[in-house]
Amino acid sequence: MKPNTQQLNDLTIQVRRDILRMVHAVNSGHPGGSLGCAEFLVVLYQNIMERKEGFDMDGIGEDLFFLSNGHISPVFYSVLARSGYFPVSELATFRLINSRLQGHPTTHDGLPGVRIASGSLGQGLSVGIGAAQAKKLNGDNHIIYTLHGDGELQEGQNWEAIMYASAKKVDNLIATIDLNGKQIDGSTDEVLAMGSIRAKFEAFDWDVLEIEKGNDIEAIIAGMNDAKSRTGKGKPVCVLLHTEMGNGVDFMMYSHAWHGKAPNDTQLEIALGQNYTEGESDY
């Protein structure tokens, strides 16, 4: 039985707490984008994706997710742990030597839920397309989901993949773009303006939809169900997810400054105080 909206909201608050504590503990990591995508990944794993019990790399008979902007690993690790892929207590090892939870996800450590090494930006869509085509060859009707940063689209390999996906009618693929308008050095418009991302994807013959409230649980559920309904119709699907970097922590929002900076002790307490729910279970 799928969790209700209140349960998803409570889990999102817990995930935000995990993110904050993980990056604070080692004074490194990327809280901004992680916080901005917390609602999306919670909804994806708890409501949208069809997942099997356990984990295997083949992923036959289930939906698959590939994180392309791997620097937002804190939110990915938290959602995986809270979804039962590995013990929540392991979150305490984030970015430590010999940990399975490195700054960018890797596969050689055998962490359940992680299917590709990511963090070198611009590569996740190519991998997702390959997995989607493998699903088709295997007669597996499940969907491939990918997540990308908007600044990541400044990498050229994305556009080769975007062109290929439509040309080959890879219509079992939903690529979501975290459209927060910020990257490590400033706004995306200041660093390298990309114009209308929607127009670009449509020019490459993708089916594009937007989730304007990308930090709202119900809006994400509605938008992603819409995206699912558009698969299998000859075109890959792109979701433009409008989020706020640092969402849920007032002093981290509306700025690129917290893209890759950890909070100090005082800031952590303030941030945790803004993200409290009954029944929290910090690791």
Image: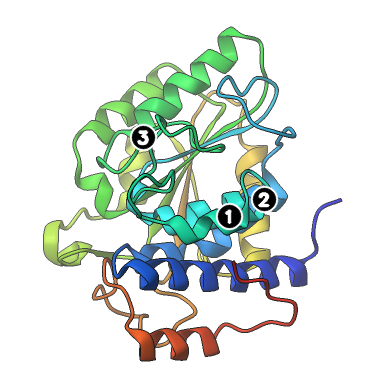
Q: Provide the residue designation for mark 3.
A: 117
SS at mark 3 in the image = loop
Say above or below: 195 vs 238: below
Question: What is the quadrant of the C terminus in the image?
Answer: bottom right
Where does residue 72 sit, x and y in percent of width and height? 38, 55
Q: Secondary structure at mark 1?
A: helix
Residue 122 sits in quarter: top left
Residue 7: image quadrant is: bottom right
Q: Nearer the viewer, residue 165 or 263?
A: 263
Q: Amino acid at mark 3?
A: Ala
Does residue 245 show up? no
Circle number at residue 228: none
Q: Is residue 141 above or below residue 49?
A: above
Of 170 and 96, the residue lying toward us:
96
> Is disc 1 in contact with disc 3, using a CB cutoff of under 8 Å?
no
- From the top left corner, tell me how far across and down residue 187 is, in percent: 21, 68
Q: Is residue 147 above or below residue 274?
A: above
Residue that numbered label 2 is attached to: 83
Identify the residue at image location x=24%, y=76%.
257
Q: What amino acid type should be assigned to the residue bearing mark 2?
A: Ser
Amino acid type of the residue tagged 1 in the rendering = Val
Estimate the spatial distance between the alpha carbons at disc 1 and disc 3, rounded to whole Å: 17 Å
Q: Earlier in the sequence, mark 1 or mark 3?
A: 1
The colour scheme used here is rainbow
Return the residue found at the far top: 137
Q: Position of residue 115 (x, y in %)?
A: 48, 31
Q: In the drawing, does residue 103 fall left or right of residue 42? A: left
Q: Secondary structure at mark 2?
A: loop
**Residue occupied by mark 1:** 79
Say whether marks 1 and 2 touch (CB < 8 Å): yes
